[in-house]
């Protein structure tokens, strides 16, 4: 039996500022089969909510599944310390 031992590194999880987040919604109204209409992907929740409002007004459909996609980067403690040194801050 082999056991792999990992050294614990307390990475910090940060939002990736270079990648746009993604918001979208899909209409899941309906009893047997869901409607399936999609809002398309947006970089902001505003247009998605607007799409939902318009759709509900036009069709009476009132149930949606919302998806959010974001990108994360893992930063090791050594890099945080380096950043703090460069910016003169206390991270
Ligand atoms: Zn619908």
Image (cartoon, rainbow, N blue to C red):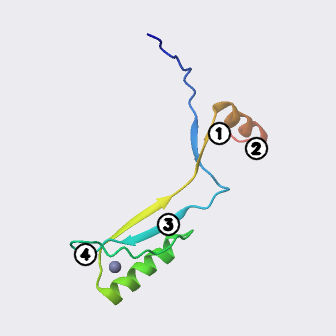
Q: Residue 57: x, y in percent?
A: 34, 88
Q: Are the two marked residues, 1 and 4, in contact with CB atoms closer than 8 angstroms?
A: no
User: Mark 3 — residue?
Assistant: 23
Q: Is residue 31 left or right of residue 38?
A: left
- In which quadrant of the rendered image does the N terminus lie? top left
Q: Quadrant of ligand 1?
A: bottom left
Q: Of callouts 1 and 4, which one flags the residue occurring earlier in the amino acid sequence?
A: 4
Q: Name the element at disc 1.
A: loop
Q: Of callouts 1 and 3, which one flags the residue occurring earlier in the amino acid sequence?
A: 3
Residue drawn at x 32%, y 76% as measured from the top left: 35
Q: Of callouts 2 and 4, which one flags the residue occurring earlier in the amino acid sequence?
A: 4
Residue 51 in the image: above or below residue 78: below
Q: Residue furthest bottom?
A: 58
User: Mark 4 — residue?
Assistant: 30
User: Distance of mark 2 from mark 1, alpha carbons?
Assistant: 9 Å
Q: Residue furthest right?
A: 86
User: Distance of mark 2 from mark 4, alpha carbons?
Assistant: 54 Å
Question: Cβ(mark 4) to ligand 1 < 8 Å?
Answer: yes
Q: Name the element at disc 4.
A: loop
Q: Are the two marked residues, 3 and 4, in contact with CB atoms closer than 8 angstroms?
A: no
Circle on res. 91: 1
Residue drawn at x 49%, y 70% as measured from the top left: 45
User: Distance of mark 1 from mark 4, alpha carbons?
Assistant: 50 Å
User: Mark 2 — residue?
Assistant: 87
Residue drawn at x 51%, y 58% as measured from the top left: 69
User: Distance of mark 3 from mark 4, alpha carbons?
Assistant: 22 Å
Q: Residue 74: x, y in percent?
A: 60, 40
Q: Of callouts 3 and 2, which one flags the residue occurring earlier in the amino acid sequence?
A: 3
* 32 or 49, nearer to the observer: 32
């Amino acid at each position: 039996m082999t056991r792999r031992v990992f050294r614990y590194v307390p990475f910090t999880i940060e939002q990736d500022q270079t990648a746009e987040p993604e918001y979208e919604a899909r209409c899941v109204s309906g009893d047997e089969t869901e409607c399936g209409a999609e809002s398309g992907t947006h970089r902001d929740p505003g247009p998605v909510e607007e799409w939902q409002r318009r759709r509900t007004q036009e069709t009476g459909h009132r149930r949606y599944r919302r998806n959010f996609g974001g990108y994360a980067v893992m930063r090791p403690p050594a890099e945080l310390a380096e950043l703090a040194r460069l910016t003169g801050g206390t991270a």
